[in-house]
Image (spheres, rainbow, N blue to C red):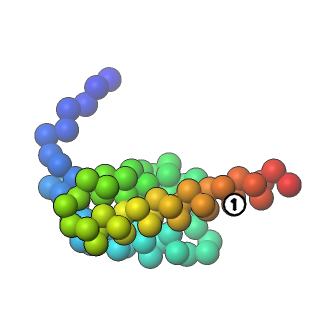
């Protein structure tokens, strides 16, 4: 099934709120990175890559980098 999105990221969510909020969430040491991805929160951060505001775009990059690092750590800890 294909969906056509008739709104943009900025119409649906206020990036000035959601991205700093997600940044605080990913800084929680008990964050389950897999669940963060499953609920679509990482997708919101990736959409932030397209923002014109440099500061918010940097927040989006930091969120993604942090989650990728957490996924690696949590995946490796499950292997051993």
Residue 4: % across, % down = 20, 32
Left or right placement of residue 35 versus residue 9 in this view: right
Residue 52 visible, this orientation: yes
Judged from the image, the secondary structure of the residue bearing numbered disc 1 is: helix
**Residue lying farthest right?**
80
**Residue sitting at x 35%, y 67%:** 58
Q: Quadrant of the N terminus?
A: top left
Q: Residue at x 40, y 68 (%)?
A: 22
Q: Residues within 10 Å of mark 1 (few under 14, many from 20)?
A: few
Quarter assignment of residue 48:
bottom left
Q: Is residue 30 left or right of residue 80?
A: left
Position above or below: 23 against 69: below
Depicted 43 relative to depicted 24: above or below: above
| Count of numbered marks | 1
The answer to whether residue 44 is seen in the rendering is no
Q: Quadrant of the C terminus?
A: bottom right
Left or right? Give the position of 79 relative to 31: right
Residue that badge 1 annotates:
73
Question: Farthest front residue?
Answer: 54
Q: Residue at x 75, y 54 (%)?
A: 76
Extreme top residue here?
1
Where residue 36 appears, as percent x and y from the top left, is 50, 57
Up-down relation of residue 23 to residue 50 (above or below)? below
Q: Residue 46: x and y, percent? A: 37, 53
Is residue 41 or residue 76 the one in the foreground? 76
Residue at 71% in and 53% down: 75
Residue 54 versus residue 39 in the image, above or below: below
Position of residue 52 measured from the top left corner of the image (x, y, whole percent): 19, 61
């Amino acid at each position: 099934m294909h969906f056509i999105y008739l709104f943009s990221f900025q119409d649906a969510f206020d990036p000035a709120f959601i991205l700093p909020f997600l940044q605080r969430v990913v800084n929680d040491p008990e964050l389950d990175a897999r669940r963060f991805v499953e609920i679509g929160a990482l997708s919101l951060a990736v959409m932030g890559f397209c923002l014109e505001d440099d500061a918010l775009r940097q927040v989006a990059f930091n969120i993604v980098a942090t989650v990728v690092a957490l996924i690696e750590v949590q995946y490796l800890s499950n292997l051993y």
